[in-house]
Each structure stands twice: as structure tokens, then as C-alpha cells.
Image (cartoon, rainbow, N blue to C red):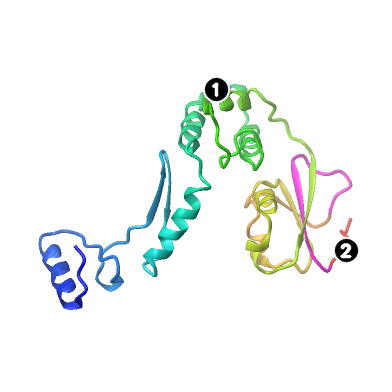
């Protein structure tokens, strides 16, 4: 039901509440009991977009843009990973090894890149599990030129999210540092021998050297 008249809309909402129903008045936030976000369904992966009632049109626009980014195979990939838990645990008993395995496989350009269509998700997951999960020593330097972490590249954000160790040079804003993996080891200086895994150095654009 669509009612332009404010009084009629309020009366209709009151009648429904009197019957014990929750009411969602799409274009009148003050009258609603709950919010309905725009949904992208790639079951079992479900993405909900909400603007807190500010604009249903904005939520729909975002859903339309994101729909094009999430391939139809995403649900099949999720089911394949869920069904392969036991096989992954048998092949990679250590939790840290499994974390590395999935992070590498699901990274942008990885074997299981979730934004890339997969014709056979189960076969792709099985192949990923058969691969190595051994720690590889990597060093990644990220230049920070803005206080807004949204201006970092997707690759830089992904590296922050999976880093094992982090060195933050003076001048890097906290908003950027907060995007790093929570349990990453925080370094005071860059050691001569790097720790296993991925070490990320966050450097402000004006800086030119790393303390060692």
C-alpha cells in the first residue's frame, strides 16, 4: 500500500500495530518499527545494504552496482569451502596454516578470488587445499598519502587485512593503521631478519626511509 497523505499513512500503521504486526513505512522513518535493507542473495552468502532509513533509493543504487561485482558462482564457492573443512583440516592441521591457505586463495587474483566467476567451485577448492600453506617471508611497503583509508588501493587494504607483522612509521594516521589485522605483531623497527609471513610497512608519503 502506498499512501501520500501523512495522516492516512499514520492511521494505517496504527491499525497494523493494533493487530500485533511490526510496521515498515518505507518513506517515513519515524513511523517504522524496523528497517529493510537492500539484499544481494548469493545464498549462503547474503549481503545487506542499509542507509539507516536515510534513502531507500541510495540502498537500491548500491545494490545494483554491487550485484554486478558478485558473480553467481559466489554461493557455490561458499558451499564448497564449507564442505571442504574436514579435508582442509586434514591437509593443513595448524590453524595458522589454514588461515594462510584461505587468505592466499581468496585474495584478489588468487585461485578462489570470490569476485571472479568459477565454473567448478568444488574442483577449485580441492585444488587450493592440495596446494602449499607454508609461510613465505614477504615485505610490503604501503605509501600513505591521505588520512582516508578509503583512498588506499584494494591490494593495499587486502595486505593490511592479512599481514602477520606491521611497522607503522610516524605520521601515518590511526584511521589507516586500524585497517590492519588485529593480531598482527607490531614492530618498533624493521629487523634484519624478517619474521615469517607478510610484514607490512606503513610509510607516510613525505617519509623516505625505514628505521632499522
Q: Residue at x 66, y 46 (%)?
A: 162
Q: Which residue is mark 1?
A: 87
Q: Is residue 138 above or below residue 176?
A: above
- Quadrant for the C terminus, please: bottom right
Q: Is residue 169 above or below residue 118?
A: below
Residue 56: % across, % down: 37, 64
User: Does residue 124 appear to the left or right of 205 in the view shown?
Assistant: left
Evaluate whether residue 192 shows in this view. yes
Query: Disc 2 vs disc 1: which is toward the camera?
Result: 2
Residue 104 is labelled as none
Q: Mark 2 or mark 1, which has the lower sequence index?
A: 1
- Quadrant for the N terminus, please: bottom left
CA distance separating discs 2 and 1: 46 Å
User: Is the C-beta separation of discs 2 and 1 under 8 Å?
Assistant: no
Residue 208 is labelled as 2
Q: Residue at x 77, y 39 (%)?
A: 196
Mark 2: secondary structure: loop
State yes or no: residue 165 in magenta.
no
How crowded is the residue under tag 2: few (<14 C-alpha within 10 Å), some, or many (20+)? Answer: few
Q: Residue at x 15, y 64 (%)?
A: 17
How crowded is the residue under tag 1: few (<14 C-alpha within 10 Å), some, or many (20+)? Answer: some
Mark 1: secondary structure: helix
Evaluate whether residue 92 shows in this view. no
Q: Where are the magenta residues, as a range? A: 190-206
State yes or no: residue 200 in magenta.
yes
Q: Residue at x 20, y 60 (%)?
A: 22
User: Does residue 78 appear to the left or right of 166 in the view shown?
Assistant: left
Where residue 124 sits, quadrant-wise, is top right
Amino acid at each position: 500500500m502506498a499512501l501520500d497523505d501523512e495522516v492516512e499513512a499514520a492511521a494505517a500503521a496504527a491499525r497494523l500495530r493494533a493487530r500485533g504486526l511490526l510496521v515498515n513505512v518505507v518513506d517515513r522513518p519515524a513511523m517504522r518499527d524496523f528497517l529493510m535493507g537492500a539484499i544481494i542473495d548469493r545464498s549462503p552468502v547474503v549481503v545487506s545494504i542499509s542507509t539507516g532509513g536515510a534513502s531507500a533509493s541510495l540502498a537500491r543504487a548500491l545494490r545494483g552496482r554491487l550485484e554486478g561485482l558478485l558473480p553467481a558462482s559466489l554461493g557455490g564457492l561458499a558451499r564448497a569451502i564449507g564442505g571442504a573443512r574436514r579435508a582442509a583440516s586434514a591437509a593443513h592441521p595448524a590453524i595458522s596454516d589454514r588461515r594462510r591457505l584461505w587468505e592466499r586463495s581468496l585474495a584478489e587474483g588468487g585461485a578462489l578470488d570470490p569476485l571472479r566467476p568459477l565454473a567448478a567451485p568444488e574442483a577449485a577448492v580441492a585444488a587450493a587445499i592440495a596446494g602449499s600453506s607454508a609461510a613465505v617471508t614477504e615485505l610490503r611497503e604501503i605509501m600513505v598519502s591521505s588520512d582516508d583509508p578509503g583512498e588506499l588501493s584494494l591490494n593495499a587494504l587486502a595486505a593490511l587485512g592479512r599481514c602477520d607483522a606491521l611497522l607503522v612509521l610516524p605520521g601515518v594516521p590511526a584511521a589507516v593503521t586500524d585497517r590492519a589485522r588485529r593480531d598482527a605483531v607490531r614492530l618498533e623497527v624493521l629487523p634484519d631478519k624478517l619474521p615469517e609471513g607478510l610484514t607490512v610497512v606503513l610509510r607516510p608519503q613525505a617519509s623516505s626511509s625505514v628505521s632499522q
